[in-house]
Image (cartoon, rainbow, N blue to C red):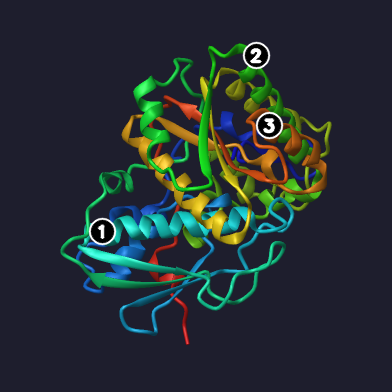
Amino acid sequence: MQRRQFIRLAGGGAIAAASATTLVGCSSALPPEAIAAWNGPGNEPDPRRWVISHAILAPHSHNLQSWLVDLSVPDTITLHIDRSRLLPETDPFSRQMMMSQGTFLELLDLAAREKGLRAEITLFPQGVFGPTAIDARPTAQIRLVPDAGVMRDPLFQQVFHRRTNREAYETREPAPEALAAIAGSASPARMRTGFVLASQLEAIAQHRRIAKEAWRIELVTPRTVMESIQVLRVGPKEIAQHRDGLTVNDPLVRALAAVGLFDRSKPPGPEDSATRMQIDDFNPKIDTTPAFYWLVTEGNDRVTQIEAGRAWARAQLAATAQGLSMQPISQALQEYPEQAELYREIHELVGAPLPRFTVQMWARLGHAPTIGPSPRRGVDAHVMRG
């Protein structure tokens, strides 16, 4: 989600981080230790850690990486959700967090297959969470079983190339065969995907309108925009320390932060220039996006949310294989009161009437410039101790 482009100066005022790209002697490249996980596991002898090293490269809401694994039982991985890494304001029922458990499991399964292992995944081995809250019980238990008959999946080859691309996309539409590959990447029961293209003028205008208004609402709602500001990592030191969240590494922003002029203690007001610049950056990207993708499920229980996360991971990998980029635009799908009307509208727009159906994912899709990977915390940070 596009949450990284404004900064608020101490004492009032703001500048756009996106325009602050050069200072003598400074680089905007991420510190190597923050992206070391993208180099792969090397000669890791433990197959569990080997597959986990790929699973932690999965997409995750706000890049919070809320995955905890218990390796105390041989040949077994028990997956938990890290409840210190939730988004209670924008994801009050942890639906997106459950999808992020699914993205982890999908990449883990792909990696296991590559290793000649069958990942026997049991969801919620101690019982399923209720619809509005989560607890300390595991979300999945995985046994890795050697199996000469297991089939490798070609999507595994895209794991290290996948990116969530927030840049401006080219206006040319994706080719029909690319859309077919994305749609065909996952087709479980009770789930469907769809697309709208720029050539469908009336329909895409409605998608763009909802996306822009939902983004504006999140920006002008203090508690929701602060949830993003609180996980903003500025400069190499913070990025290397946390290796998660939303990153800003522009040299000018770093310089302002170094002298105490970057204010992250409170949200910008609805009429502040910081808010206006965020909107002015986001809206043109939406207006020129050539396609939108959506993923709809029948039902919205916790198992279905995890299955939707697995399907989303496969869709993004399939898009990567086709030379395309995707970026979730999840604001209108979030279940807090200020988004309720747009939540209803997006469901109606894609033919998913409530409450029977749920739009689990909605994303921009198109050709975009090459970008680097986002920070990752490494396997050790996810292994439970004691």
Marked residue nearer the N-terminal end (3 or 1): 1
Vertical comparison of 213 with 295: above or below:
above
Left or right placement of residue 62 versus residue 169 in this view: right
- Residue type at the position of mark 3: Gln
Marks 3 and 1 sit apart, C-alpha to C-alpha, by 42 Å
Q: In this orientation, which residue lies closer to the viewer: 110 or 255?
A: 110
Left or right placement of residue 157 versus residue 355 in this view: left
The furthest residue to the left = 148
Q: Which residue is mark 1?
A: 113
On-image quarter of the N terminus:
top right
Q: Which residue is mark 2?
A: 202
Vertical comparison of 259 with 14: above or below:
below
Marked residue nearer the N-terminal end (1 or 2): 1
- Residue type at the position of mark 1: Arg
Question: At x 29% / y 49%, what residue is drawn?
Answer: 156
Q: Quadrant of residue 92?
A: bottom right
